[in-house]
């Protein structure tokens, strides 16, 4: 190959910018794909996409190389022997899979069919499996964030996200935005910090987010539920909670309060001094509703034996702060509306 000629040719090539989505993870960040001489040349974050806001993570840039990866699977592959595959057309693949499925359903019934995927395909999977008579939709959610999404769904009708941009006080427990997906979140958190917002990170390890926190508070792994209970107790015992919100929207407040789980008990379990737990509760209350306990993601919100209860307490702490639907507090995620509209349910502020 004449590389000089190739380089010259490449210089004069026209660059076109195509809007697209990164497929590197479930954030599906918006990208600009730059195409030159018919090849993908580079990618950048799309400035208007809520997950990227003009930035991509390192993986997003790396994923662009997959386009020309010689090992990339770009069409259906049929297994013809142990570890041997041959490429087939999409028409052949649909025909073969359809025939096999038909046979299976006729012989054994539709409930023997399982749809297994990463997730997020409910819109297609549900009617498809309904037709076959199967309930078997399996995703990685059970090992990812099911506890969190299920509890938020059951207690509040759907998932809520923090309003980083207008918050004054943010408490992150086991949530490391700097080491995880959603590039725009870190951008928003650091911008808010430069405006004077306070960040508290509670995590057994000094995670990446802790490096920009005002305070990093180590906790014994798996004891976040006790820590949250200690915060809730302080908010109620010191009369710092949002009574109007509780009166209007909360069920079972008296039964909850009668548990009497105070900051001292939370301290014994979590290893965080009781005074520090009380201080955090007071700071949250002082800044509410522009303050929140981040709803979390993995780890304590998904993978522990007490993850369900931990997420319940997360919802309760935020409810005591009365920060739902308030600037600097929590707002419903986009999926909330999609699910709610399917069930014809909406919950508006004040209603
Ligand atoms: S977080 Fe990274 S890998 Fe995931 S969609 Fe965004 S850029 Fe791609």
Image (tube, rainbow, N blue to C red):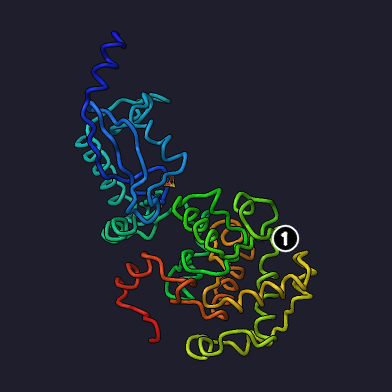
Spot occupied by residue 217 in the image (x, y as percentages of width and height): 71, 60
User: In the image shown, does 119 or 165 lie closer to the viewer?
Assistant: 165
**Is 299 left or right of 336, judged from the image as shown?**
right
Residue 322 drawn above or below residue 1: below
Identify the residue at image location x=43%, y=54%.
138
Ligand 1 found in image quarter: top left
Classify the position of the C terminus by image quarter: bottom left
Residue 92 drawn above or below residue 29: above
Quadrant in which residue 331 is drawn: bottom left
What residue occupies the far top of the structure in this picture? 2
* Secondary structure state at the residue bearing disc 1: loop
- Residue at which label 1 appears: 219
Spot occupied by residue 119 in the image (x, y as percentages of width and height): 40, 53
Classify the position of the N terminus by image quarter: top left
Identify the residue at image location x=37%, y=34%.
64
User: In the image shown, does 287 or 296 lie closer to the viewer?
Assistant: 287
Identify the residue at image location x=52%, y=64%.
148
Rate crowding at label 1 as few (under 14), some (14 to 19) or many (20 or more) other CA atoms within 10 Å. many
Spot occupied by residue 286 in the image (x, y as percentages of width and height): 61, 78
Residue 19 drawn above or below residue 319: above
Identify the residue at image location x=42%, y=25%.
83
**Is 71 left or right of 194, judged from the image as shown?**
left
């Amino acid at each position: 190959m004449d590389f000089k000629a190739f380089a010259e040719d490449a210089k004069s090539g026209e660059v076109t910018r195509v809007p697209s989505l990164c497929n590197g993870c479930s954030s599906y960040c918006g990208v600009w794909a730059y195409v030159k001489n018919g090849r993908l040349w580079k990618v950048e974050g799309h400035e208007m996409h809520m997950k990227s806001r003009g930035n991509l993570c390192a993986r997003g840039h790396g994923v662009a190389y997959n386009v020309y990866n010689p090992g990339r699977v770009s069409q259906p592959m049929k297994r013809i022997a142990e570890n041997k595959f041959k490429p087939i057309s999409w028409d052949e693949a649909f025909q073969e899979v359809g025939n096999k499925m038909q046979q299976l359903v006729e012989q054994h019934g539709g409930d023997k069919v399982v749809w297994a995927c990463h997730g997020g395909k409910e819109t297609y999977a549900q009617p498809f499996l309904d037709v076959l008579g199967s309930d078997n939709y399996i995703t990685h959610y059970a090992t990812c964030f099911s506890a969190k999404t299920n509890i938020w769904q059951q207690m509040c009708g759907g998932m809520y996200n923090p309003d980083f941009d207008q918050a004054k006080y943010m408490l992150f427990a086991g949530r490391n935005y700097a080491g995880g997906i959603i590039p725009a979140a870190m951008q928003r958190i650091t911008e808010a910090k430069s405006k004077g917002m306070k960040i508290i990170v509670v995590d057994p390890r000094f995670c990446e987010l802790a490096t920009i926190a005002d305070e990093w508070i180590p906790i014994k792994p798996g004891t976040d539920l006790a820590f949250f209970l200690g915060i809730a107790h302080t908010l109620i015992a010191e009369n710092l909670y949002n009574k109007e919100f509780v009166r209007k929207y909360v069920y079972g407040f008296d039964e909850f309060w009668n548990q009497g789980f105070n900051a001292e008990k939370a301290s014994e379990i979590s290893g965080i001094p009781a005074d520090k737990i009380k201080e955090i509760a007071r700071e949250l209350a002082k800044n509410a509703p522009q303050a929140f306990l981040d709803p979390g993601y993995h780890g304590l919100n998904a993978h522990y034996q007490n993850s369900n209860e931990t997420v319940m307490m997360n919802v309760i702490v935020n409810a005591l702060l009365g920060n739902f639907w308030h600037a600097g507090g929590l707002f419903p995620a986009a999926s909330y509306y999609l699910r709610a509209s399917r069930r014809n349910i909406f919950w508006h502020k004040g209603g």
